[in-house]
Image (cartoon, grey):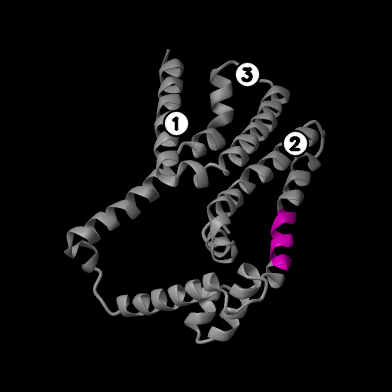
Amino acid sequence: MGAIGPVLMAELAYPNHRATATAMSNTQYSTGSVVAAWITFGSFRMSNTWAWRVPSIFQALPSIFQAIGVLFLPESPRWLISQGKEEKALDILAHYHANGDREDPVVQYEFREIRETIKLEIAARQTQWSELWRTKGNRWRSFIMIWCGICKQWSGNGLVSYYLHSMLDSAGVTSTFHQTLITATSGMFSLACSVSFAFLPGRVGRRPLMLWSMGLMWLVFTLITITTGG
């Protein structure tokens, strides 16, 4: 879902709404985190095995809803064109981007763009992987792709998600009640921040937003490291 969902969202969203729509789709992690945290907060005081069974059951529900809901989603226009089903792809683009008008300029432009891109991708499959490094432009593009992947993995959210318990223990917060409460409220704060910032890419730009976010995250985690070591 994390890899394919935003891609389908970008295909189906209207061009002017694409940046906000894809950003909003990523905020749903925080929504699930808030629900999970409050369910855990309510069940940890149970004195039997249902203390962990209840969160586990609720954890499975979103996957069930997704498995059923995916049957009602429209197919990817890119996939349809790659399979030779161009008329169906054009119908989907027209339905979501022009109220069914197949001759709309935006729809026709997107349709031609997707078709030409797929042709280039098919041609690229016949080239060697060394093409990524052969020219200066390709080396720069390859660096951007690799570096963006590294930045995404090193953004810091994993540290807080996976080691919050240890961080709270080191801060002297050892009560299960207070730890689960902090987890739940921090999830709500993360959700509010992520939804608010999801509207910024279209106004501020993706690159400035990414650079500022990386810089501030680096500053925050540097302060956490210094204070933890002290």
Q: Position of residue 68 (x, y in %)?
A: 73, 67
Tell me which segment is drawn in magenta: 60-69
Point out the tag, 3 or 2, that comes first from the N-terminus: 2
The residue lying at 46 percent from left, 74 percent from top is 114
**Front: mark 1 or 2:** 1
Q: Please tell me the numbered disc located at residue 38.
A: 2
Mark 2 belongs to which amino acid?
A: Trp
| Secondary structure found at label 3 | loop
Mark 3 belongs to which amino acid?
A: Val
Check whether the beta carbons of the residues at disc 3 and disc 1 lie within 8 A of each other: no
Residue 178 image-quadrant placement:
top right
| Secondary structure found at label 1 | helix
Q: Position of residue 54 (x, y in %)?
A: 78, 45
Q: Please tell me the numbered disc located at residue 189.
A: none
Left or right of 18? Residue 30 is right
Q: How many marks?
A: 3
Q: Mark 3 to mark 2: distance in Å?
A: 18 Å
Asked if the magenta segment contains residue 68, the reply would be yes
Quadrant where the N terminus is found in the figure:
bottom right
Quadrant where the C terminus is found in the figure:
top left
Residue furthest top in the image: 230
Q: Please tell me the numbered disc located at residue 173.
A: 3
Q: Residue 188 versus residue 24: which sits nearer the camera?
A: 24
Residue 211, above or below 129? above
Mark 1 belongs to which amino acid?
A: Met
The residue lying at 39 percent from left, 31 percent from top is 215
Residue placed under numbered mark 1 in the picture? 217
Residue 34, above or below 96? above
